Amino acid sequence: MSEALTPIEKTNLVELEATIEKNLKSFYEVGFALMQIRDNKLYRESFTTFEAYCKEKWNMTHRYANQLIASSEVVHNLDEMGTMVPKDIPERQLRPLTRLEPTEQWEVYEHAVETAPEGKVTARHIEETIKEVTGYKHTETHPVSDAMFFAGVAIVQLESIKQDDSKRLEALNMVIEWCQKQIKGGNHE
């Protein structure tokens, strides 16, 4: 069941997809374009889910798309605080910052730039700076970090449910029930 896009949405989708295609190596523009496509459900005419859109259109996993989106949000947050991030910075380098609040992202990134060995900021150096500045180790292999990352992604997705969606309350109750089962020791998959 596909829902037709308005002419303005179709134009917007074409422009955003052109950005993705042209800038596949420029993650922040790709992440920002993907976020708009996801949040406005601009994939809906040809795909039933954002995950299917990413896989079929860009041969990209849903997880990687969300990592691009989260890292592009870090660039946006840093920019809002007056810190310019180099245009050629790899997404992987900023990924550890996605688990922090915007003010922590800025504090850690600024400190990482100031203390980078030989002036080269790496993902490893950012991880070390996170531990130094916040006292907490945020690594991808740390189960709590993965849990926090995916919880954040889930919240972003839930926030995209429109207030006037007739199934909104039912959907939120479904999430509440699932969470309650997890807390009580239900499904641990």
Image (cartoon, rainbow, N blue to C red):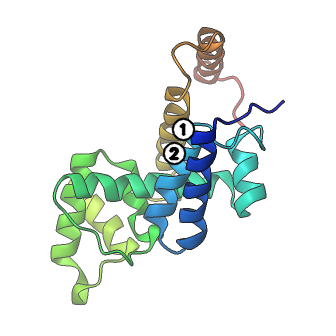
The amino acid on which the numbered mark 2 sits, given as a three-letter code, is Gln
Image vertical order of residue 151 relative to residue 84, above or below: above
The amino acid on which the numbered mark 1 sits, given as a three-letter code, is Asp
Q: 93 and 147: which one is in front?
A: 93
State the residue at coordinates (71%, 46%).
51
Q: Residues within 10 Å of mark 2 (few under 14, many from 20)?
A: some
Image vertical order of residue 155 relative to residue 105, above or below: above
Q: 9 and 21: which one is in front?
A: 9
Residue 107 x/y as whole percent: 18, 57
Q: Which residue is at the far right?
A: 1
Q: Which residue is mark 1?
A: 39
Image vertical order of residue 185 relative to residue 54, above or below: above
Report helix, strand or loop for mark 2: helix
| CB-based contact (under 8 Å), mark 1 and mark 2 | yes
Classify the position of the C terminus by image quarter: top right
State the residue at coordinates (66%, 15%).
174
Q: Which residue is mark 2?
A: 36
Residue 177, which numbered label? none
Q: From the viewer's perspective, tell me whether residue 100 is left or right of residue 80.
A: right
Residue 73 x/y as whole percent: 38, 52
Classify the position of the N terminus by image quarter: top right
State the residue at coordinates (18%, 76%).
115
Residue 14 x/y as whole percent: 62, 55
Q: CA distance from mark 1 to mark 2?
A: 5 Å
Q: From the viewer's perspective, tell me whether residue 183 is left or right of residue 186.
A: left
